[in-house]
Image (spheres, rainbow, N blue to C red):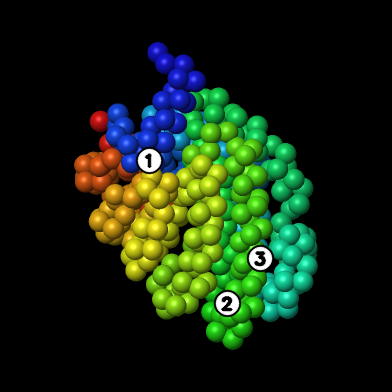
Amino acid sequence: MKTTKELYNERLNRVKKAIKLEKTDRTPVVPFGICIFPKLTGVKMSDFVADLDLSNRVILKGMKMFGDVDASPASFCFASTMGTTSFSNMKLPGRELSDNMLWQVDERQLMTTDDYDTIINKGFEAFRDDYFASKINLDLDVLNEVITKCPQYMKNINDEGYPLYGAVQIVHPIDYLSVGRTLSKFMMDIRKMPEKVEEVMDIITDSNIKAMKQAVKNAVDPLGVFIAMGRGCPDFYNPKLWERFVWKSLKKITDAIIETGAAASFHADSNWERGLDYFKEFPKGTCVFETDGTTDIYKIKEKLGDRMCIKGDVQASKFVLGTPDEVYDYSSRLIKDMGPGFILSSGCDIPANAKIENVKAMISAAGK
């Protein structure tokens, strides 16, 4: 029987090889998202969100219940601090919502155009700290608890044989601004004051890159850096605006990640088909294209399969409405068709109301 250290190294190397497009003994499987763990372990969502220590134990227990998976998606429940990445208030189960509802981003205008000037004049860090304290319902004690305890939570997961996938995260500035301003007002901003918005995005990008590099240095065996860019989909903008306000920062962020030796993991929500050719600029075996199931995974394979690892793409609907046989067959087909350089995963988060037998069917397909 293998020790947890042997399992850890085996899983770590399997994922690393897939990222580098190398042949592996089997396709690695890395579930995405954490909201399935309360259902899997019989814990109330409100307790999972409110107690960081409990959430670490729940995720670890859930990983063991899943079986032979190759990395954990997280080490604790981050729902109470998600406002730091979306610049928004959060509605949480047991607080604004009933006990077993999923947490929600409460998107409304909290930033003004004057905030652009503050960022330019005072810097992003000074603006951000004030914003967290005055504009969003973020419990700063909880944030400090996350900062203090996160290394131990990660170690707890590692010690049980599971590497962490995406333990380091960097946020594209468009996610901050398009939620803090709201998407509609941000769209008006890039038309009415494009130079100012671009200057602000440059400042945020540089600040986040600096923090990311330090986080990679502090991380244990960082597999990749998760790039949050949910509002960056090419379908949302005309090509010139997308190049200026999405791709420019995304390329700079990606180049900086690659310099650290970690892989850049693009979390590409919605349909990115129109922008796939841009990703050919990055060196082979340095990036992961992580799709939520909206972008045709076969189109990603056609455009990028010889350059970067593909991660996905069992859709939420299959987990909730499908049968184990349907999920298993789809997962098996992906493994066969994607070939080396593929990580089997859910298309974005495994939904909180997924059928557990369907999740296990996906995982079993990777171990056949």
| Residue 29 placement, left or right of 94 | left
Question: Does the image show residue 184?
Answer: no
The answer to whether mark 3 and mark 2 are in CB contact below 8 A is no
Q: Which x, y percent locates residue 117? A: 73, 76
Q: Residue at x 38, y 32 (%)?
A: 14
Q: Secondary structure at mark 3?
A: helix
| Residue 258 placement, left or right of 194 | left
Mark nearer the viewer, 3 or 2: 3
| Residue 239 placement, left or right of 74 | left
Q: Quadrant of the C terminus?
A: top left
Q: Residue at x 34, y 63 (%)?
A: 277
Q: Quadrant of the N terminus?
A: top left
Question: Does the image show residue 214?
Answer: yes
Q: Which residue is mark 1?
A: 20
Q: Which x, y percent locates residue 11? A: 42, 29
Q: Which residue is mark 2?
A: 186
Front residue of 88/194: it is: 194
Q: Which residue is mark 3?
A: 203
Which one is earlier in the sequence, the residue at label 3 or at label 1?
A: 1
Which one is earlier in the sequence, the residue at label 3 or at label 2?
A: 2
Spatial CA distance of label 1 from label 2 is: 37 Å
Q: Secondary structure at mark 2?
A: helix
Mark nearer the viewer, 1 or 2: 1
Which one is earlier in the sequence, the residue at label 1 or at label 2?
A: 1
Q: Residue at x 54, y 64 (%)?
A: 249
Callout 2: 10 Å neighbours few (<14), some, many (20+)? some
Callout 3: 10 Å neighbours few (<14), some, many (20+)? some
